[in-house]
Amino acid sequence: MDSRPTPDAMNVFSTLPPLPGVTSVIEYWVDAWQRSILVLDVLRQRGNNYLEHNAREAPHVLSFDAELVLDGRTLPRPVNYALVRIVPGTGTAVDPRKRPFIIFDPRAGHGPGIGGMKHDSEIGVALAAGHPCYFVGFLPDPMPGQTVEDVCEAEARFVEDVAARHPGAEGKPCLIGNCQAGWQIMMMSAVHPELAGPIMLAGSPLSYWAGVQGKNPMRYLGGLLGGTWLTSLAGDAGNGVFDGANLVANFEALHPDNTFWNKIYNVYSKVDTEADRFLEFEKWWGSPVLLNAEEMQAIADDLFVGNKLASGQLHTAGGIHVDLRNIKSPIIVFCSDGDDITPPQQALGWITDLYAHEDEIVAAGQTIVYCRHQSIGHLGIFVSGKVATKEHGEFAQAMDLIDLMPPGLYEAVITGVDAMVEHPELVRGDYLFTLEARAVAQISEIVANTPENDLRFTAAARVSKANQSLYRTFLSPLMRLTATEQGASAVRRLHPNRVRFEMFADANPWMQPVAAWAEWIHANRRPVSADNPFLAFEHMASDMIANGLEVWGKARDAMSEQIFLSAYGAPWLQALMGLHADQATASRRVERDPAREAVAARLAADLALHIETGGLPDAAVRALLYIRLPEGMADERGLAALRAISSELPAAKRLGHARFKELVRNQYLILRLDEERAIAAIPKLLPADRRTSEAALALIRRVIESGRVLPEEGTRRLKRIEALFGGVPAKTGQERQAELVAS
């Protein structure tokens, strides 16, 4: 029997005479009824997608073809991760001489593929820039006994394999870690600092106690639950497995207005155009994966509540100190003020945890770059097409520039190219990428951390540890005794985040006629006119519902924050946990490391011995740095000019990327060590052939002129360098302009 409505049921309304108000009611009612059926059909498709997607062995949402390179399940310490090579599409060519990119997807409850779900994505921009591209994803089920440390070791092996596949590349592989994957590759790189090239962290939390009071309530969750004992309970009830759907539920709880109303109403109100985008995103959002209970417990204890990574308290099972200061690769932090899951305070707070001053960053040999978006949300950082084509695209193009920057702290500033930009022919694309030197004090202003808050979170961590001990002693043995795999699987399947997908699939007999109804409606669609008064009333009612849910969510968050601050700020509780108010003035920065300081002192002493030794390349790089140093910034035009110059030189005289990077680093440190002596020593580095020195000076001028107009101090320094190189001083821009006016 055909369950579709008959045409007469619809056409009868078209024969009615136009009546004031009645026509608008009928028009709106027909459209609302049709939209309701179409939304039901969208939910049906979502349910079918959910079942089909999760039935696969390796479900993902990558929109690129890929071939398996290394299966983590075959490693000595097996993990459910895999390394694949992204196959460039037709018309996309990669340059084997360029550094490879590896995108690491976050295992934070959802499945893999988010970094390459769209063409305009992290993978897409890396391929467009000509870089070989790889992707690290994971399977839904963890390997037995798999730990966070095992995953780090697997990722180290992946990076090794990629580097081995590209021996001729200029530079080590660039690693991009989204959200959870960011702190994972930071841990790996701290233990294996020799492997990675530039490391980019997109929306990755590293300082878990940081945040803005009144804005970032998620950081209080561990304390409000009494610590991580509930994580242990969930793992025991899951028979040694933690359900990632619980993490997804935490994310959804942040915005009840979006979770319970706006998301589905957006589909309902735009069902004719929004369905495909909704289904594409929900395929990823509705595919929660599993973690071993031990993995999740380590994440909750050591990171979320313990905050041990940035504070330098984390050690491997073999006793290796996981110290982020060990990382010598450039670290790029991309965060957003609109991200309430990883706010800028959590993305950048580790810098102030490790360093009190930018000189300490230089002494540690680290290059740290950060970029703050003004409004994009957490997922938009690595999903938004606009962000991919602008910020991620610029980072992909500028990665070599970042890799060449001397140690220090910089902010990436991305601006449009207009008539005011000098030498636009040296700028690739529509944006100019500039790195500007910053001070740690400026990061401290962003983080705005207080010792009193640190004391509260320290108390919460100690309460968590005490409750965890109580749970392990008294309740955990009983839970483990009664837990079964059958029962755990049933509980996982009944999780609300799974039920709300599966209940609308075709497997539900009540959904059987929906597809036929939707097909008929598409053929007989009668959308309401935009000026219908009842449609305006619908939008107004929707706004009222959404605003009510938003107000409720903010009130809940404010109350939660006050409970946390009051409870863990109570002197009696802090005293009970072995804390006292005087400790609020103590810093939680990483302790001094005498061995590290001794290495830095030896390096400085060695550099002092080489101030007056070297050759023409050393002199040229030292001169370039000296001239531009007061500006505290560099942009892509200078690197473009250097590349153009290098291409004109005979192959035997070209400096490779690694050698040039070493030159820049050493000459910068020499200038910081003793600038006056370093500049005075330049004539000793020059060859006896005057023509060679003058040719080198011409190249220096060419690079200088490719960027911004020199300020007065830069012009003075250039004239000094010209005198040292024995050349005729070049006329300044002001002098040339004066001559032009006079003529």
Image (cartoon, rainbow, N blue to C red):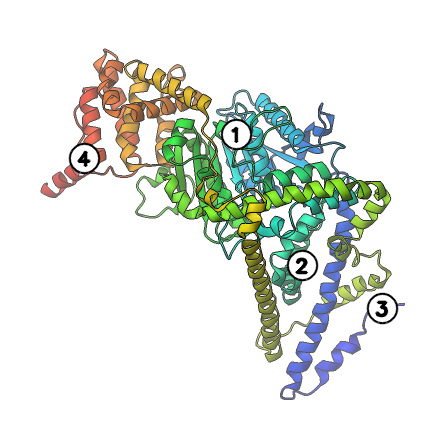
N-term-proximal mark, 4 vs 3: 3
State the mark number for residue 55: none
Instruction: State the residue at coordinates (24%, 17%).
Output: 681
Viewer-closest of 514 and 142: 142
Image position of 620 with respect to 426: above or below: above
Dot placed on the residue nearer the N-terminal end, 4 or 2? 2
Judged left or right of residue 671, residue 491 is right
Q: In this view, does 265 lie above or below 70?
A: below
Residue flagged by tag 3: what amino acid is it?
Ser
| Residue that badge 2 annotates | 275
> Which residue is drawn at the image coordinates 57% and 54% (left, top)?
567
Task: Using the numbered discs, state the Cα–Cα distance from disc 4 to disc 1 in whole angstroms.
Answer: 48 Å
* Residue 732, numbered label: 4
Circle 2: residue type: Ala
- Closer mark to the observer between disc 1 and disc 3: 1
The N terminus lies in which quarter of the figure? bottom right
> In terms of sequence position, does the residue under pointer 2 or pointer 3 come before the other?
3
Residue underneath mark 3: 3
Q: What amino acid type should be assigned to the residue bearing mark 1?
A: Asp
